[in-house]
Image: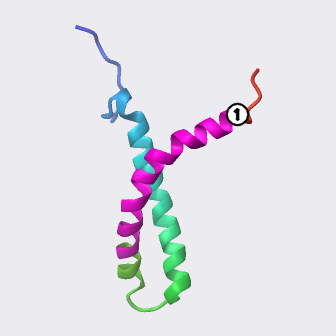
Amino acid sequence: MTEVKTKRGAFIAPRFTTVAFSFMLSLMMSFIVSGISTVRSVGLSNGLLALWMENWFASFLVAFPAVLVVAPLARKIVARFTVEG
């Protein structure tokens, strides 16, 4: 049996790195963008936090699959413009 070295607190298998990264990226980005959008729409008013959380959830439901689809395309585009060596 092969021994697997893990970092303290690590629990994600290496094969899931891309999905885990996409999940975290879309979670954080949708949080920030939905917050800015919500404040711009309704201002600093009562109920802002609840409305923001509703908007964040809806944004995340779109953002996560979008990152999974768009990230490989973005990598290919960047690779075309990247100088080797």
Magenta portion: prevailing SS class: helix
Q: Residue at 45% x, 53% y: name it.
A: 66
On the image, which quarter does residue 57 sit in?
A: bottom left
Q: Which residues are magenta?
A: 54-79
> Which residue is labeled 1 in the image?
80
Q: Position of residue 59 (x, y in %)?
A: 42, 66
Name the residue type under label 1.
Answer: Arg
Left/right of residue 38 with respect to residue 20 in the rendered view: right
- Quadrant holding the N terminus: top left
Q: Is residue 22 magenta?
A: no
> Which quadrant is the C terminus positioned in?
top right
Residue 66 included in the magenta stretch of the image:
yes
Examine the rendered structure and indicate whether residue 63 appears above or below residue 77. Answer: below
Residue sitting at 46 percent across and 91 percent down? 45
Is residue 53 positioned above or below 10 on the image? below
Q: Is residue 35 left or right of residue 7?
A: right
Q: Quadrant of residue 17?
A: top left
Q: Residue furthest bottom?
A: 46
| Residue displayed at 44% across by 45% down | 68
Q: Residue furthest left?
A: 1
Task: Specify few, some or many for label 1: CA neighbours under 10 Å numbering under 14, 14-19, or 20 or more.
Answer: few
**In this orientation, which residue lies closer to the viewer: 15 or 82?**
82
Percent x, y for residue 23? 40, 48
User: Which residue is found at the position 40% from the left and 69% from the top?
Assistant: 56
Residue 49 in the image: above or below residue 21: below
Q: Secondary structure at mark 1?
A: helix
